Amino acid sequence: MVMAVTMGSAPMGMFVACGAALVVFVLGYALHPLWRTRPALGIGLGVALAAATVALYFAIGTPAGLQPEQRKAPQSLDEAVTQLEAELERDPNQIEGWRLLASAYTAQGLGMKARDAYARAVTLAPDNPDLLAEAAEARALATRERRFDNEAVAMLKHALEQQPMHQRARWFLGIAQRQAEQPAEAAKTWEPLLTVVDPATAASLLDQINGARQEAGMPAMQAPAPAVAGNAAAAGPGLKIRVELSPQLAAKLPANASVFVIARQVGGPPMPVAVEKHPAAKFPLEVSLDDGDSPMPTMKLSQLEQVQVLARVSASGNAIPQSGDLTSQPVTVRVDTKEATVVVIDRAVD
């Protein structure tokens, strides 16, 4: 763990005890509805998240601080928060400490304190898109009108500079633009999300987009054609891709998973210039990417000479890479090639 000063075992043990208690309290608060309806699943999630927290601490923390003689567990959420506040006052350069404290403040309904804690975390990690989206949301929740102010909007835009398809940042920025009576901008911000969210979410998202387009005096947008069917109206060259799955990973293929076939700029941002989503039910999978598969109107496949092609299996159906996804090595290929480019899904995402 990188910190400005070295922490001794006993203070670190106190910090971990506070953190562990906060995790328990926050998980209990967040998973309470799930426990009521599906107790087995709720308990399983709680145990899994707690185990992940412990594993993370042993990987990057100071396990000696967990010795019983060095630990004094807080007996309530208020006591845990007080001890964590004291620890962060002693050593304020702990990003996850501020983030955890902000989550605890949110659970307590202390919106302004959560906003300020997230702000401290952002000063330590100004380019973390997840943290920027959380901090922006906290700023909105701290106001009576739940409005995103100029600073929150700046955070969201910076998050998208770091990760253009960060879904929470895009969604929040669209909300902020609609709050600012900029419906055309909101619709433009939300439209790329239609290609990466699951069909149920896409339907409700399209309603929001068309509501914004109507406010802007723009025609309604039609639902995008299913990726499997392709897009007959697409212009520009088509890039044939054959996706294969390594036999060693066949047993690890999640049920009801999706496979994303992606083309992106060589040496450019991670934002795809073309992407299709298919059920990961049958391999090999053969697709053709063209300009109709572009999620952004400002960059088309036909505008480039060469691209990087890759494929990724997602258990969640989310286009953003997550730990446990299966992926291929990117392959650089010319856009005008006539032969099918073969990519092999042969590794797990770390």
Image (cartoon, rainbow, N blue to C red):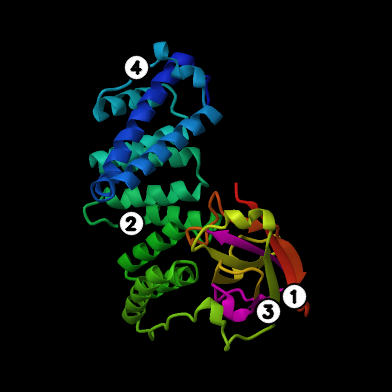
Q: Which mark is residue 340?
A: 1
Which amino acid is tagged 2? Answer: Phe
Amino acid under disc 4: Lys
Q: Is residue 286 above or below residue 82?
A: below
Picture quadrant where residue 208 is located: bottom left
Instruction: State how far apart marks 4 and 2 are (Cα).
Output: 40 Å
**CA gap, disc 4 to disc 1?**
62 Å
Q: Earlier in the sequence, mark 2 or mark 3?
A: 2
Quarter of the rendering containing residue 284: bottom right
Rendered view: 82 above or below 132: above
Q: Is 299 situated above or below 101?
A: below
Rendering coords of residue 169 (x, y %): 43, 57
Q: Earlier in the sequence, mark 1 or mark 3?
A: 3
At mark 1, the secondary structure is loop
Residue with the mark numbered 3:
302
Instruction: Identify the residue under disc 4.
Output: 72
Q: Is residue 112 visible?
A: no
Residue 244 vertical position relative to residue 81 in the rendered view, above or below? below
Give the residue at the far left of this rendering. Answer: 144
- Say whether marks 4 and 2 touch (CB < 8 Å): no
Secondary structure under tag 2 reads loop
Q: In 3D space, how far apart are the residues under numbered discs 2 and 1 (Cα atoms)?
A: 47 Å
Write down the region rendered in magenta: 287-314
Q: Earlier in the sequence, mark 2 or mark 1?
A: 2
Q: Residue at x 38, y 23 (%)?
A: 17
Amino acid type at image mark 1: Ala
Which of the labelled discs sits on residue 148, or is there none? 2
13 or 84: nearer the eye? 13
Alpha-carbon span between mark 2 and mark 3: 37 Å
For label 4, the crowd category at 10 Å Cα-Cα, with few meaning under 14, some 14 to 19 and many 20 or more, is some
Looking at the image, tell me whether mark 4 or mark 2 is earlier in sequence order.
Answer: 4
